[in-house]
Amino acid sequence: MSDPRRSLPGVDSLLASAEFRPLLAGHPRSRVIRATRAVLDALRGEMGESAQPALPEDYAGYARRVADLLIILDRPSLRDVVNATGVVLHTNLGRAPLSRSARAAMLRAGEGYSNLEFDLEAGVRGSRYVHCVDLLREITGAPDALVVNNNAAAVVLAINTMAQGREVLVSRGELVEIGGGFRIPDMISRSGATLREVGTTNRTRLSDYRKAAEDRAAAAILKVHRSNFRISGFTEEATVSQLAELARELKLPLFHDLGSGLLADPGVLGLPEEPRAPDSLRNGAHAVAISGDKLLGGPQAGIILGRTEIVARMRENPLTRAFRVDKVTLAGLEATLRHYLDPQEALREIPALRMISTPPEELESRSRAIARALGDTALEVRVVEGDGAVGGGTYPEVPLPGWTLRIRVPGVSSQETALRLRSGEPPIVARREDEEVVLDIRTVDPTDDETLVAALRGLSPPSSDTLSHRQTSGLQDRAE
Ligand SMILES: *Cc1c(COP(=O)(O)O)cnc(C)c1O
């Protein structure tokens, strides 16, 4: 018997065919060749595995498969997804979605030139570090501010500036890992300083810091907000005010790594109290660091707020050049900060704050409307109470009470259903619980509700597409 693999057409004859002409008209030749090779490779693989491989019947069949693959290859790597997880600051999904005016400002900054580092009055070189400073001072009361790439960079910059070659005092209860590899002990050593552990995991007293500073090797005190976990029970920690007093006595700077960047009133958001940068500074911290894309609700950035002298030293540190913030980020951050001049506007315009404070009734009625729109399908849909989360390593264990859609496709596992939702355009990311797919629309823009309905309708009736989907993703794996 002849090897059926022989019956595959060659790349050259496919490319020369009339059926492939439209593909070559629409895509660079090299790309069509690449996709054609990938399709043929995949078919060859299938032929190896199956006694009766389903080969395309004609050149038009090959052209369709290549066209399907080209669609996948032409898709950007970074794609829009619908976040139906109910986790507002989902780090894996890009943290804070941006306000309309932040988006517009970023587009403008990207489109043309700007006075990024140019003094328009004097007509000479200016500094990119002047942008956002006045707004940050006005909103937080901080004497000075410095914006860098992210909070991790802010911490490295601060430690390096304050304590290179010397010791940093940190409570053993604050030697945390925030996520994405941000571990305080590693950051301190990479910043060129030495960690001096103070106290114990659950209890660290002011006297512990004092004792640790006795030998005069310490150059700074670092307080770290635990962000993504809690310790409870037999615990004790020194407050910022207490540490500030000790810092004054010992003539050491006190740096507070806060992270969350909450500037809004947590009560209005329905959240418990959380240390905020202005409080920290008022209580005597010399400088604090916050993230731009956590509860502040802006683009990825690290913001150092603090006393003029210490911020000036950080600004002059050569590392600032390595951590320098991009113009598009500065534009988005400035527009986001501007919302905070009017706290009502901040709640209305900043998507993360709006999503956190969405009333449960609104989530229930939107979920019920989606369920109704699926009434004529074979899907089993339940609308039940369920909690969202703030996410981004903030407010661990604080539920955001709301409502969820729970969906089951008869005869299809929840795993398969979730995969199909992720494979759509746009991909929809949901949670799975037991045998149901759980969608929390807190994090879905209401204008996307229809997209969600269309995608969910597409799950029913159970289609026989699953196999061909697998084939396509297999092709992609091979091609990429
Ligand atoms: C989130 C967080 C960081 C890291 O901030 P990025 O902006 O993600 O770099 C550092 N410290 C604390 C306390 C945090 O919560």
Image (cartoon, grey):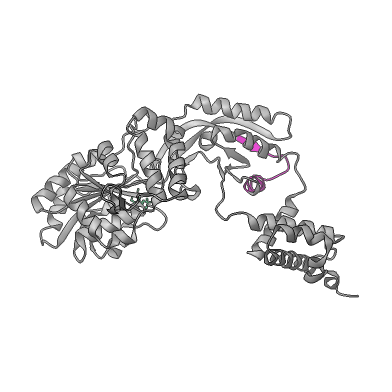
Q: Is residue 418 magenta?
A: yes
- Which quadrant of the figure has residue 323? bottom left
Front position in the image: 113 or 218? 113
Instruction: Point out the residue furthest to the left here.
Output: 249
- Which quadrant of the figure has residue 316? bottom left
Query: Which residue range is magenta in the image?
Result: 406-422
Image quadrant in which the N terminus is located: bottom right
Is residue 73 visible from the viewing direction of this image? yes
Is residue 54 visible from the viewing direction of this image? no
- Left or right: where 278 falls relative to 442: left
In the image, residue 403 lies at what x, y percent?
53, 30
Residue that appears at 76% across and 39% down: 461
- Which quadrant of the figure has residue 230? top left
Instruction: Point out the residue furthest to the bottom here.
Output: 2
Q: How many marks?
A: 0
Residue that appears at 32% across and 45% down: 231
Q: Vertical placement of 346 versus 39: above or below?
A: above
Q: Vertical placement of 166 versus 243: above or below?
A: below
Front position in the image: 102 or 24? 24
In the image, residue 101 lies at what x, y percent?
44, 37
Q: Is residue 27 magenta?
A: no
In the image, residue 351 lies at what x, y percent?
45, 36
In the image, residue 443 lies at what x, y percent?
51, 37
- Left or right: where 185 falls relative to 15: left
Image quadrant in which the C terminus is located: bottom right
Front position in the image: 130 or 225? 130
